[in-house]
Image: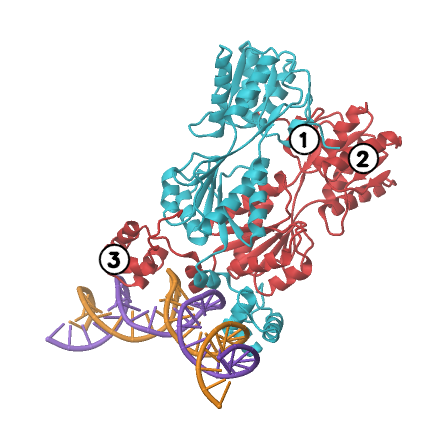
Chain colours: A red, B cyan, C purple, D orange
Amino acid sequence: MSQDSERAATIYAVAQRAGVSTATVSRTLAGSAKVAPLTREAVLEAVRALNYLPDGAARALAGRRTHALGLVLPDIVGPYYATLLVAFEMTASERGLSVVISLAGAGSTPDQAVRTLAGNVDGIAFMARSAADDELIAEIARRRPVLTAARSRLPGRDALFAENRETAAQLTRHLLEAGHRRIAFVGRPEPHSDVGARLRGVKAALEEAGLEPAAVFEVDSVEAEGLAVARRIVAEEIALDAVICGNDELALALMHELQDLGVDVPGQIAVTGWDDVLAARYVRPGLTTVAQPVQELGALAARRLAALIDGEAPLEEPVVLPSRIVHRATCGCGTPGEGEILA
Amino acid sequence: MSQDSERAATIYAVAQRAGVSTATVSRTLAGSAKVAPLTREAVLEAVRALNYLPDGAARALAGRRTHALGLVLPDIVGPYYATLLVAFEMTASERGLSVVISLAGAGSTPDQAVRTLAGNVDGIAFMARSAADDELIAEIARRRPVLTAARSRLPGRDALFAENRETAAQLTRHLLEAGHRRIAFVGRPEPHSDVGARLRGVKAALEEAGLEPAAVFEVDSVEAEGLAVARRIVAEEIALDAVICGNDELALALMHELQDLGVDVPGQIAVTGWDDVLAARYVRPGLTTVAQPVQELGALAARRLAALIDGEAPLEEPVVLPSRIVHRATCGCGTPGEGEILA
DNA sequence: ACCCCGAATGAAACCGCTTACACGCCGGGT
DNA sequence: ACCCGGCGTGTAAGCGGTTTCATTCGGGGT
């Protein structure tokens, strides 16, 4: 046996040892109502003596509050979700709430997992392209407060976003100002995805300049695809001044391979990414990319969800947090700004 | 209001609508005991019609099982913990268990958070240098199955590790074979930490060769420190052939700065890291580092914890999973092996 | 001395589900 | 025809807390 076999002490045992009723123990521990100092001491001493651990399930059942937030994420590794998660958890735990996560991998039976999750928490935040579809979220929303982040919005529910479109347009204009004309995009612009919004921003900026994308490579955001695109560009001699990638993995792989194939970055082809991962700082030349407000997104999600659970009204409008272009060297603008390694 | 105000359907409502008792509903949903096909259908239809969502708290209370695993991590971002977490969650969810995380940040009041967590789950995995100390873990262990990973072992409890010492020794020997003699170590070797074990391995291998570390820079594993160490090495003209870093962040920052200061890596100074982060593949020259079996660690932790909860006996011996040196170019051995970007 | 009030506490009714136990029913063996 | 054994189902007792409501008790005001 891993744990001691003595049956765990209950609130009744504590009450008995302290010579009070369970109500008093409960009140003492909750710190809510008034308890006479002497009584309080007796209770606390009994708690200590019995190594009493309140049962979360019983507490949740009686109090009609699990004090837990659900977080549904795609099963993707990488700094983006890790950062989000950390910020979410920290914010939740500051408020005494715990976090139950569910990685709605496309493979499994996410519906059931999400439903079970819903039965175990006070509210759920659905992040990005997690496998839960709108219909399922709507179903859950009828029973629990719910919120979405970086994901298509549900009418009447809180929605959080990191800015994509305008930032992408800005990035594109920057590239245009640096003299690039033949600009390509790499990434799969799925309907309501971030990457889709980025492509729209790029197109919009290009259109302002009377241009259109020199090419759009619709590939998944994984390293192997970046590599493949680089090879295609060189092999098929696609004439390009710059390529805007939907994320950093893509950009890093593409740039690395371009260099291996003898292409000068950014001299011949400029490259940009999105996310500002660690590697973006360390490759040479430094990768120009976009830093998203991931921490803020995670923290805000937890805060809003807690507010909704406390009965606050949903926000009228989606919240859009600003992203920030990090100028390094691969955009070829010649004036690298910040983005250096913090000293 | 965020969610519909109609009171959520309970098992009683379902039973009534289906014309059966709550026991039958429970049995049907649990899929455990025999239920007549017709009855089952009636129940399921009632569940659907009422959009019934079982209350996890009530279920846990009655069943004396939360069906949840606790995971305590340091509040560190980076691919290591993200990968661990993903593997842990996937493995848990395959078994129908949910995962409650707690980031035991050194700052907060981790003890209380961990205790509360313990009251909400069937068992807890303590990972790496999370803020929970041995005493606290021992206290929890008296009430719940508990396991540690990449962390000092608790007598009588399961313990999982990634190999550190021998791999570090191997890495050191490799450096020696490449002709390096003056070898330094960078990282803070805290008592039971991974980094400590790595330093011991380095020292052991050096000793075999009749050497000792040319220097040990005891700094935290953050970029800024790597940068600072690089500057010291150059400014103080410390004569070094190679520097083994406790993790990749340190190695990347150090190497980048060394290069900026005109030092040839690995020509003048070889550099190695630990963890095999994404950036290790993309810097030039490619960073030689050590890949840890993080996924396996996470998955195994979940599997073992589930087993302990099911009453299995703890393992007699700690489990040590092998790490793997990824040879790239910064070790200066001239024969870069694998570690290329996956095509 | 009496009354009233508030503070501290206790009794007990839930919260929604699981499950031990009991029961009714039906079919096969004797 | 009778008995017995299972199967399918219902009854009801918890699981371990929270919270409402009532009760007790000690003072201060008049």
Tags 3 and 2 on a common chain:
yes
| B61 to the left or right of B96 | left
Identify residue for label 1.
Answer: A280
Chain bearing mark 3: A
Which of the chains bears the disc numbered 1? A
Separation of disc 1 and disc 2 at Cα?
19 Å
Residue type, numbered disc 1: Ala
- Residue bearing mark 2: A229
Figure check: B18 above or below B341: below
- The foreground one among B141 and B216 is B141
User: Do the CB atoms of the residues marked 3 and 2 lie less than 8 Å apart?
Assistant: no
Closer to the camera in the image, A74 or A324: A74
- Going by the numbered disc 2, the residue's amino acid type is Val
Q: Quadrant of the C terminus of chain B?
A: top right
Given residues B37 and B110, the one toward you in this image is B37
Q: On the image, which quarter does residue D22 sit in? A: bottom left
Location of residue A14 with respect to A290 vertically, above or below: below
Q: Mark 2 packing: few (<14 Cα in 10 Å), some, or many (20+)?
A: many
Amino acid identity at mark 3: Arg
Indicate which disc, 1 or 2, sits on the residue closer to the N terminus.
2
Mark 3 residue element:
helix
Residue occupying the point 56% across, 57% down = A117
